[in-house]
Image: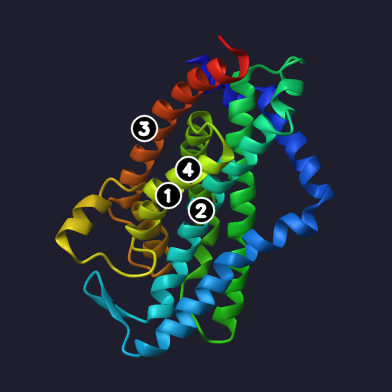
Amino acid sequence: MRRLTAAFEWQSRAVVGRHLRVYLKNWHTSFLPPALEPVTLLLAFGLGLGTYMASGLVWHGRRVDYMDFVAPGMLAYATFMTAVFQSLFGAFIRMRYQRTWEGQLTTQIELRHVVWGEILWAAVLTTTYVVIVAIVLAVCQAIGLLHLDLRVLPVVIPIVFVSACAFAALGLCFTALVPTIDHMNLPIFLVVLPVGFVSATYFPLDHPVMAAISTVNPLYHLAETVRGLLLGEGVGGHVASLMILVLIMLGALVPLEMRLLRKRVLGD
């Protein structure tokens, strides 16, 4: 139980504070690429591919513009990719090359605080990037490219943060498993990208096999939750399924990666 409640202890917040101070020193080089990537994808798919789908598409028996369909999906996709990559590459570099974890563990901080600090930091950074994308959506709405109910964005933000914690736990699990940074391609191409594609972020999943697989995909439920809120359709059972999957991921992955990292970092 202490492995899970450590998320609320001051040592975990101290790890997040340390990462924030380091990030702010080089924010101009660290901020733009991950923040602009979902914006670029939104414009490429929404304005590019959307021009070939002038009649829109059918979602839950309702015809919607493709731009309106893909915009909420990009919020979910940005949540998933940012959280996973931050806890995968960022955490691995701090663990293996910068030896940041070793320095933290010489203080009052224990391994469980390091793990939760990495998860919470990835969630904070992810939420910040999603807010930036949401501001871009508001600008697109102002110039008439979108027709969404942006008043519900304050409800979307905490959902994004909690989901990002689960996605960060997934990335950190791979950090605990891969032997070198060159092996990062394995989880990316075998797990991360397939999860991203089978998530209804860019297109509906009408094929019965894909639809069945998506029921256990937390990113799919996040995309449908955000889309339902912004399009005024309601979230149905997607938000409940999302929260169940998030709790399962955190409850299973965090203790697992703590055991794996204890063996790898401390040699226990």
Q: Separation of disc 3 and disc 1 at Cα?
A: 18 Å
* Front: mark 3 or 1: 1
Q: Amino acid at mark 4?
A: Phe
Q: Which residue is mark 4?
A: 167
* Front: mark 4 or 1: 1
- C-beta proximity under 8 Å, tags 1 and 2: yes
Q: Which residue is mark 1?
A: 192
Q: Separation of disc 4 and disc 3 at Cα?
A: 12 Å
Image coords of residue 61 (percent x, y): 21, 73
Q: Separation of disc 2 and disc 3 at Cα?
A: 19 Å
* Front: mark 1 or 2: 1
Q: Is residue 134 above or below residue 166?
A: below
Q: Which residue is mark 3?
A: 248
Q: Amino acid at mark 3?
A: Ile
- C-beta proximity under 8 Å, tags 4 and 2: no
Mark 4: few, some, or many residues within 10 Å (few <14, many ≥20)?
many
Image coords of residue 170 (percent x, y): 46, 38
Q: Quadrant of residue 37?
A: bottom right
